[in-house]
Image: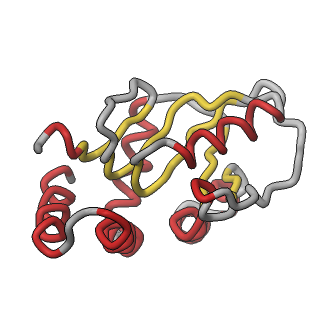
Amino acid sequence: MNAEIQNVVNQFLEKYVGGEEFYDALDEQIRIHDIWLYAMIARIEKETSYDRWIVSGKFGRRFYEFVKTNIGEEGAQKILVASGSLRKGKAIGLEEEDLTGLEFLFIDDSFWSGKTRDVIQRYLEKNHAHLKKTYVFYDGSKKKEETVESFYRYYDYH
């Protein structure tokens, strides 16, 4: 899995000079690979316990549909799907609800600044829940965060 993502990252690094174009292209690749989504779910199930998942944006809607189709309605009911562009200040788009004591995993395509994760974390805390970890395919953050798990971390290779 890491090698597949590394190949895609290297292709896009040759084509783009980072920035929005790079992330948009990479995120689109992540969304189209069912085997990658299966691999993420398998990794999560192997590594950690949790109560529910929370996702956002285009990736979140794709992930939700993937789970609903391949795992079933029961699996999909465990997923909260927030709006996209949270890092740009868009409203989270979720109803306030009592999530008291639940542990969540945030699953996303990529991680860079942590702004999206931070919005998710504030929402969960406001609703008495806890964000246990963040799982992403690509971590481009300069600082390694202990609660972020990824298949590929840019600064481990570059």
**Color style of the picture:** secondary structure
Location of residue 153 with respect to 82 vertically, above or below: above
Q: Does 139 sit left or right of 62 as displayed?
A: left
Residue 39 percent location from the top left of the image: 34, 53
Q: Say which quarter of the image contains residue 11.
A: bottom left
How far across and down, in percent of the image, does residue 124 sit?
Answer: 74, 36
Q: Is residue 128 above or below residue 70?
A: above
**Residue 68 placement, left or right of 37:** right
Q: Residue at x 63, y 56 (%)?
A: 86
Q: Please provide percent x and percent y for residue 78.
A: 69, 49
Query: Which one is nearer the viewer's eye here, 28 or 80?
Result: 28
Numbered disc total: 0
Tell me the residue at 62%/64% (across/down): 84
Q: Residue at x 21, y 46 (%)?
A: 154
Q: As drawn, is 141 to the left or to the right of 89? A: left
Q: Quadrant of residue 149?
A: top left
Residue toward you, 89 or 12: 89
Q: Quadrant of the C terminus?
A: top left
Identity of the residue drawn at 56% across and 43% down: 117
User: Which corner quadrant of the image does residue 34 belong to?
Assistant: bottom left
Q: Position of residue 62 (x, y in %)?
A: 53, 70
Residue placed most toward the observer, 56 or 16: 16
